[in-house]
Amino acid sequence: MVALLCGSVLFACAAPAQPVALDSHRTPDGSQPGSAATSPPAPPESASTSSPEPSTSANEQPATSEQASTTAASGAVSRSTSVGDRRYPRLGSADLDVDHYKVALRYDADGVAFTGRITVAGQFVNATDQLALDNAGPTVTAVTDGAGELAFQQSDDELLISLGSVAPAGSTFAVTVDFASAVPASGSFLERAGLFRNETGPGVWSVNEPDGTSTWLPVNDHPTDKATWRFAVTVPEGLSAISNGELEGTTRDDATASSTWTWDQNEPMASYLVLLLVGEYETEDGGRSSTGVDIESAAETEDVADLDNYTAIVDRQMEYFTELFGTYPFERYGLALADSASGLAMETQGKPLFSRQDLDGSVGYFQHLLLAHEMAHQWFGDAVSPATWDDIWLNEGWATYAEWMWLEREGLSTLEEQAEQSLAGTAHRGGPVSRPHELFGDVTYDGGAAVLHALRLTIGDEAFFDGARAWVTDHMDSAASTDDFQATMEEASGRDLDTFFETWVHAATRPDMFPATA
Ligand SMILES: [Zn+2]
């Protein structure tokens, strides 16, 4: 993601000017029993907690342990409502491995709201009698499986579905949830994630990092659980719907004066990378990149011509980053020029979101920066996602570093200038995992990129880029941690990097000079 508060003072704005307040918009809504609900039995007082251990650092704030297990005659029964991410302890369930989400949405333009049905299919990782989805906004009206209705409860941003009996670890599930979601009338992307109303015309846009998807869909909302997705979005005449993946087709219903746009994302995707746009959009077939990737973009009708101004840059960036980072990780790529707030871009998988106000057809430093940043995220963040939100510096550090490399290549700035300025601005603030409440702060972006520059100087270009490619290859379509990254770079360089990672990544204060070149 890139979030800027100003779009003209470009150099100073290369990192988000203000960190997003974590979870400040989340107000547990208390218990909202559904119509078919009966309360699931509470775990006994003696329940032991067994959340996965979050990583440690000097400033660690312990994750709220929400994973309870109890002992039944058949063995341990887990009721996890967390994967133990210390920055977002409400997110995910350690009991679930979702394979596929099938989503049908109907957009009500008058109410600026959706009614929806989502089928969630996967396997249980642990034996459990409850299926817990993150659900911080939708009002659920019914839950069914193949056998009939299931009892459920909505509580503390969770949808707790009673299975009625214990499902063994390894068994499969497929539940279908009917729900309704409203699009908030106000709110800035600096304050919350999720759905937003279009800036100028009818419709909505989404930015979901890190926890926005579960404000409008019941999902297992953590990047450790990737799945394939299908979105069928029904919109009134005159509007269209854009999502990730391939447009399977559009069907028109004359009786209701509506059309349904169906998108298939058949490559595993983390929930925070979901794209949903409703507006007056058209798709544009951009042909094939020189690296052999299908280019399919989307823009509002009046903006479609602007896409052409970025075709050549996107092609050259794709070639450059493929050379540096390895084969582009997905089947297709494209730009989504959204009717969204200026100053925000998001690496939605395969089709990053940009504001039509920022990619307005002009081509300058700012456009090069945004395009490079979001494309690099396809390798760093999308193909390889953070194992916990502590690891977001591996998304933003790499995307920022790629942005610096691209700007130097275009003669718009030099890597050295960018690196020195970033180090000077962030050194006193510590390593990127030492600040758990600054998910989108400059320690993550410029600080993360400065760490990568220091690593490159320490181990040399060959090991650094070998390591970058190995990182993507080894962790493709999954999530990986800072410790995994250290292991990859140690393997690539043949060196023990404990001291480097302690000094540059974990410590609460950091060197204010780059190391000498290897
Ligand atoms: Zn980013």
Image (cartoon, helix red, strand yellow):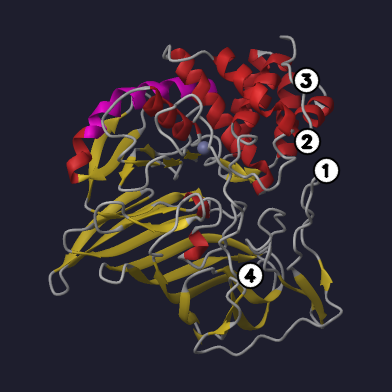
Q: Earlier in the sequence, mark 2 or mark 4?
A: 4
Q: Which residue is mark 4?
A: 171
Q: Earlier in the sequence, mark 1 or mark 3?
A: 1
- Alpha carbon of mark 2 to alpha carbon of mark 3: how far? 21 Å
Residue shown at the point (52%, 72%) measured from the top left? 174
List the single residue furthest toward the right. Answer: 46
Q: Nearer the viewer, mark 1 or mark 3?
A: 1
- Alpha carbon of mark 1 to alpha carbon of mark 4: how far? 39 Å
Residue 148 sits above or below residue 505 on the image: below
State which quarter of the image contains the C terminus. top right
State the image coordinates of residue 371 (x, y, percent, origin top left).
40, 30
Q: Is residue 76 visible?
A: no
Secondary structure under tag 4 reads loop
Task: State if disc 4 and disc 1 touch (CB < 8 Å).
Answer: no
Q: Which residue is mark 2?
A: 506
- Alpha carbon of mark 4 to alpha carbon of mark 3: how far? 42 Å
Task: State if disc 3 and disc 1 touch (CB < 8 Å).
Answer: no
- Alpha carbon of mark 1 to alpha carbon of mark 3: how far? 28 Å
- Alpha carbon of mark 2 to alpha carbon of mark 4: how far? 39 Å
How busy is the neighbourhood of tag 1: few (under 14 within 10 Å), some, or many (20 plus)? few
Is 284 in front, or is 227?
Answer: 284
State the image coordinates of residue 354 (x, y, percent, origin top left).
37, 40
Q: Is residue 314 magenta?
A: yes
Q: Which residue is mark 3?
A: 494
Secondary structure under tag 1 reads loop
From the viewer's perspective, tell me whether residue 364 is left or right of residue 140: left
